[in-house]
């Protein structure tokens, strides 16, 4: 699959070969292990691959720089039918997804989103999002969700952005997933009337801000992931609630 708006320098497609999958896992290793200090039982340090038991059940979307042939962006995608074969969604270890499962709507879990450092802030992410938009339309997806992360596990250092998400961006009750109690962290850490919202938003990672701009929300509570050295929130995006401007942004059309 190639995004319809892909220019001459980038191609977006789903992984089709073992070689492409290893390239995606190598980029994930560079970002999540080398850069962010993550780990896991199946991480292959010898060959520099970040992988887990869910990889065989996901679709892996990659963006390739055609001038070098290098995979520079990755998204991992799991539909509800794929989750049924896997036995669960990846994020069900962290969040109770009952509200989503009971919605009787087509679900797509997003994960492992990352870009090579040299391509951040450029157009590579737009190409990746274009490919995602095409995938969502083709598979008639109605709800997107997945965990996104703050680096580090010091929740006191993240009091402001977590509180901002809690006070301003909680998902509606019918879609409000909740972090599991094993590593549950309340996000209500600063009273709303004492929160500097502008300063707090500056501390929110770019990926989370992108979903908020699209009309996304977060579940109740954060989850502390010591294995990946992160504090995770669960993002939920109902595609039916995206307005025209948001949809243009999602499909790579900017303003």
Image (tube, rainbow, N blue to C red):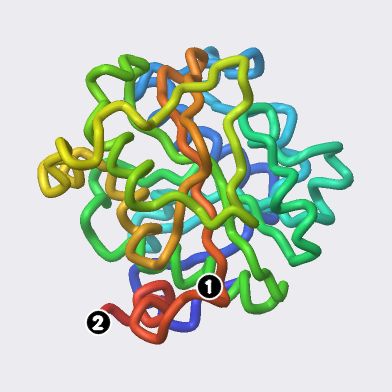
Front residue of this view, candidates 130 and 237: 237
**Residue 205 falls left or right of residue 224:** left
Depth check: 76 or 241 in front? Answer: 241
From the top left corner, tell me how far across and down residue 39 is, in percent. Answer: 51, 16
Q: Which residue is mark 1?
A: 133
Q: Nearer the viewer, residue 161 or 167?
A: 167
Quadrant for the C terminus, please.
Answer: bottom left
Q: Is residue 48 above or below residue 142?
A: above
Please tell me whether residue 156 is drawn above or below residue 10 in the rendered image.
above
Rendered image quadrant of residue 245: bottom left
Q: CA distance from mark 1 to mark 2?
A: 16 Å
Local SS, label 2: loop
Counting from the top left corner in percent of width and height, residue 177 is at 61, 43
- Percent across and percent down for residue 74 are 49, 49
Identify the secondary structure beneath mark 1. Answer: helix
- In the image, what residue occupies the spot 28% across and 42% down? 164
Residue in view at x 62 percent, y 60 percent:
14
| Residue hosting label 2 | 255
């Amino acid at each position: 699959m190639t995004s319809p708006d892909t220019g001459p320098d980038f191609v977006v497609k789903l992984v089709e070969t073992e070689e492409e999958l290893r390239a995606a896992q190598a980029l994930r290793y560079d970002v999540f292990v080398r850069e962010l200090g993550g780990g896991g039982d199946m991480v292959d340090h010898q060959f520099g691959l970040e992988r887990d038991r869910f990889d065989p059940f996901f679709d892996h979307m990659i963006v390739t720089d055609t001038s070098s042939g290098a995979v520079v962006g990755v998204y991992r995608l799991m539909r509800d039918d794929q989750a049924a074969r896997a036995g669960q969604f990846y994020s069900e270890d962290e969040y109770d997804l009952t509200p989503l499962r009971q919605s009787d709507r087509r679900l797509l879990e997003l994960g492992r989103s990352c870009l090579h450092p040299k391509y951040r802030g450029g157009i590579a992410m737009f190409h990746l999002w274009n490919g995602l938009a095409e995938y969502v339309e083709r598979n008639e997806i109605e709800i997107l969700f997945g965990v996104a992360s703050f680096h580090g596990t010091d929740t006191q250092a993240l009091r402001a952005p977590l509180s901002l998400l809690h006070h301003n961006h909680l998902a509606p009750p019918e879609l409000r997933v909740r972090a599991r109690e094993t590593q549950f962290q309340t996000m209500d850490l600063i009273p709303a009337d004492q929160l500097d919202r502008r300063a707090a938003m500056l501390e929110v990672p770019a990926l989370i801000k992108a979903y908020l701009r699209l009309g996304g929300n977060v579940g109740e509570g954060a989850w502390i992931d010591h294995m990946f050295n992160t504090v995770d929130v669960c993002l939920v995006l109902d595609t039916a609630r995206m307005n025209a401007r948001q949809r243009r942004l999602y499909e790579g059309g900017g303003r």
